[in-house]
Every structure is written in structure tokens, then in C-alpha cells.
Amino acid sequence: MITSSFQASVAVLALVTLHVSALDTFIAAVYEHAVLRPKGTETPVSREDALLLMNKNIDVLEKAIKQAAEQGAQIIVTPEDALYGWKFTRETIFPYLEDIPDPQVDWIPCQDPQRFGHTPIQTRLSCLAKNNSIYVLANIGDKKRCNSQDSTCPPNGYYQYNTNVVYDAKGQLVARYHKYHLYSEPQFDAPEKPELVTFNTTFGRFGIFTCFDILFHDPAVALVKDFHVDTILFPTAWMNVLPLLSAIEFHSAWAMGMRVNLLAANIHHVQQNMTGSGIYAPHSPQVYHYDMETDSGKLLLSEVDSRPRTSPAYPTAVDWSAYATTIKPFPVRKNTFSGFISRDAFNFTALFQNAGNLTVCHKDLCCHLSYRMLRKEENEVYVLGAFTGLHGRRRREYWQVCTMLKCKTTNLTTCGQPVETALTRFDIFSLSGTFRTEYVFPEVLLTKVHLSPGKFEVLKDGRLINKNGPSEPILTVSLFGRWYTKDSHSTSGGISNLETTNLLIATFLMIIALQIL
């Protein structure tokens, strides 16, 4: 994990020396964008055609930025891949890229557009921020020349990065972040190490990362724990995966688990299950959007605390295993069975009664549930599940999960499959687990994929409980833990073209060497 005591000290000093004019709250905006994509990405287009498409998308973003500014927003986040889409090769993405300088160069592209060569996209984004007096985060592609003699330099002589840029209300470039954890993005390179990017404003300290980064310690957790940011800016192109990883479900849970503001802007593309944006506070979602019915974008705005740690509503720290490790486990039923969620083998036990106390264990993780249903629907089955281990096909991220979820049908073999509707309401639920990690994210997802703000809370002993009366029909109640120190480490979410080439060359040379021997 990448940490820097010096950088962290500077971050703390910056917090102490903020201007006396600092604002207690600010208006945040996120925009879920229905991106206009190229008709085909098999062959490269001209730079002119690439600019034409990107400007069409910026035309849409411009309307949202102006509308947000008119409603008092001080900052707006737009999604990952919002200018051109996501399905490219290294060659076909290249016409869309610009060389983005380090923010230390003190540059306002709107006022000096030729300073770093031909940068029309950066210039237009800078002018949008400047002309509307609003901070703007946009996701674009960065290209950096490299030495062809360097073994890591790609064949075209450029590193290519999935990049976030932030322009302040004067149009100045104040932040640049290169995505580290790539996910099925052969068009981009991962930087050598995670970048820990922050910037200060009169309405708080901000950190930045992108999409898949949220599932890892660096940079996501490090920005909160070591650099003490107040708000995370989070552009994403998130494909919803039920029952545990729909966008609004996990992103709101991450904000609560990390006790930080999260401004999440997702792509809107229902054919690939992309929707779900929100403004999430440490104690509860402020506003969110999930829409699988239309093809329209959506602007969200909300007032949030500039420095939530000083707010009376700031949640207390949680010892996630305190309750579960001190009680006597409930009787473990003999009819525990195995089922799968996203290729992970969970142990399940069914909620056969209207009310009860259950325990289910997987290896050293035991999950405890106390519950009472208002009425048990005959055609619905719920289970309590536990899983601890390396997750999924990639086997790189170590999960610890306790979940109560609705099965797809009354056939227990369907438990863990995606479900979007439910009828069963719970009068009481209390979920806890013997977690070995301090990083646990509490999820409650209701029928038709909705959140439940104000209807549940996490007690400081680690119990996730309902409050303020009976719940709406429930899809899942989960405690999603990430044990980062047990991850199988890798530089990114996938193998790059260059890594694949080098691996093939190494294999070929090994075969030749063995033949010679």
C-alpha cells in the first residue's frame, strides 16, 4: 500500500490553515450522462471526427453545468468515459487523447489555450468552469510520450491514461488523476503506482479516484485515512451487479463505512446495466438516481457538510466485530447449504419462520441475524449468507460478507441470483459478523433497486439494524467487508497489451532455452 508520512503531514497542516471564510456547507452536483458513442471503434477515426463526437457530448454536459451553477452548485462531477464511451483499443482511443500537464504549472486553458499545444477539449472544459464560476470534474484521456528504449514504453511511444481533471471556478487546472485499477480497459495504461490526488477549497478538502478504484485500499482508503479528505469526487462507468454491487447500493455503503462525502456520477446506458448516481453523506444518502426505464441523463443537487467530521450528525466509529464476537452464536442449522454470488461460494441458511435468530459461518466468519417479518410471503424465500475469501474469477480482492437476501424463486438453488422486486417487509432486522477487517460497508437495498435513507443505522458495536418502523420490501441487507491486507496484489484490473506481449515473448524465449538444454 502506498503511504507517505510527509504528504499526510502536509495534508493535516493544510486543514489547520484553511481560510477563515471557509463555508460550513456547499451545494454539490453530479450528472448522470447518456453518452453519445462512436458508431464503431474497430478502426481509428481522424482527430477531427474525435473532436466532433467529444464536443457533442460536451454540449450536453454544458447544459447540465449551467443548470447546476444557476441553482447555486459550487462543484459538479461528470462520469467516467462521458466524452466518448468505453469500448476501444489502444489505437482507436488515441485520436481522443490530449497531453494533460501537471496542475503545478498554474494553467488556465481558457485564457492560454496554446500553452501546451493543441488542447481544445481542455480549453472548452476550463471555459465552462470559468464562465459558470463552478468547479468541474471531467474524465478524459491523457497521453504521455515515453522513451522507446524503455522496455515498458508501449509500441506507439505513448503511455495512455484514463484521467480525471478538475478546473476551479476561475478555470484553472487544479487536479489531475490517472486511474490505477483498470477494469477491461486495454486502451489505457496503469500508472506506476497509485496517485493520491487532493485539492483544497473554501468548502472542504477533496480527493479523487475512478470507478474500480473504490474496491481497493489505494488510492481510495488512503485518501480518507491518511489525507483526511472531506469529500471524494467519483466519476464511474459502473455496470450494476446484483445482489451486492449495484451502484447506488455499494457507493452509498462506502460513504457510510468510510464516513466521508461521496459524489458519484455514473454513465447512463441501460443496455449494459449502467445507471445509479448519487450524493452520499457519511450518515445517509442525500439524493440518488436509478433509472432502467429511460435513456435520459439526470442532474442531481444537494447541500452537504463541507467538513463532515465537525458536524453533529457525523457517525461514531464502529467496531465491526464487537457484538458478534461477544455473544453466544445462535444455533447453526443442519440444513445449511452452498450457493453462489458472483462466483463466490457462500454458505446459506434459510429464514423458514416469520421470526428468528440465525447464525451461519464460512471458515472463520460467522454471521448473526435476528429478524421479524411483518408477514411471510408464501412465494418468497430469504436466506442468511456468509463468505470469506478471494473474490470471483480474478481471485484478487479478499471479501468478508454477511448478507440477508431474497432468493430469485422458492427454489434454493436460485439464492444469490439477481433479484429486483420483493414483497416481504421486515419489522425487525439486526445483522452482525465476526469480521477480521475494520473496513465494512453497510448495504440495505429495497424492492425495485431503491435505497432506504433514514430507515436503518449501524450501532457502534457493529450491528446493522432497522429503525423508524417497518421496512419497505427488502432485496438485501448486507455487511460488505474488504480485508485489503489479504488481497492477491496486482497493478490493475486486467493485463495490458504490453504485459501480454512481454509475457508471450518471455514464454517463447523459455521454450527456446529448454529446447537448447
Image (cartoon, rainbow, N blue to C red):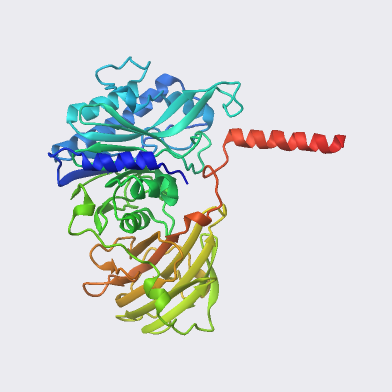
Residue at horizontal 47 percent and vertical 58 percent from the top:
483
Displayed quadrant of residue 475: bottom left
Whole-percent x and y of residue 143?
A: 45, 25
244 or 397, nearer to the observer: 397
In which quadrant of the rendered image does the C terminus lie? top right
State the residue lying farthest toward the left: 21
156 or 241, nearer to the observer: 156
Displayed quadrant of residue 39: top left
Q: Is residue 121 above or below residue 378?
A: above
Whole-percent x and y of residue 293?
A: 33, 52
Whole-percent x and y of residue 375?
A: 32, 81
State the residue lying farthest toward the right: 517
Residue at horizontal 16 percent and vertical 47 percent from the top:
25
User: Could you tell whether 217 is left or right of 508 in the image?
Assistant: left
Q: Is residue 410 above or below residue 489?
A: below
User: Could you tell whether 436 is left or right of 444 in the image?
Assistant: right
Residue at horizontal 32 percent and vertical 56 percent from the top:
252
Q: Is residue 504 above or below residue 224?
A: above
193 or 140, nearer to the observer: 193
126 or 415, nearer to the observer: 126
Q: Is residue 172 above or below residue 231?
A: above
User: Could you tell whether 375 is left or right of 148 in the image?
Assistant: left
Q: Could one spot residue 33 in this view of the protein? A: no
Q: Could one spot residue 279 in this view of the protein? A: yes
Q: How many marks?
A: 0
Whole-percent x and y of residue 383?
A: 44, 74
Residue at horizontal 36 percent and vertical 17 percent from the top:
116
User: Could you tell whether 24 is left or right of 83 in the image?
Assistant: left
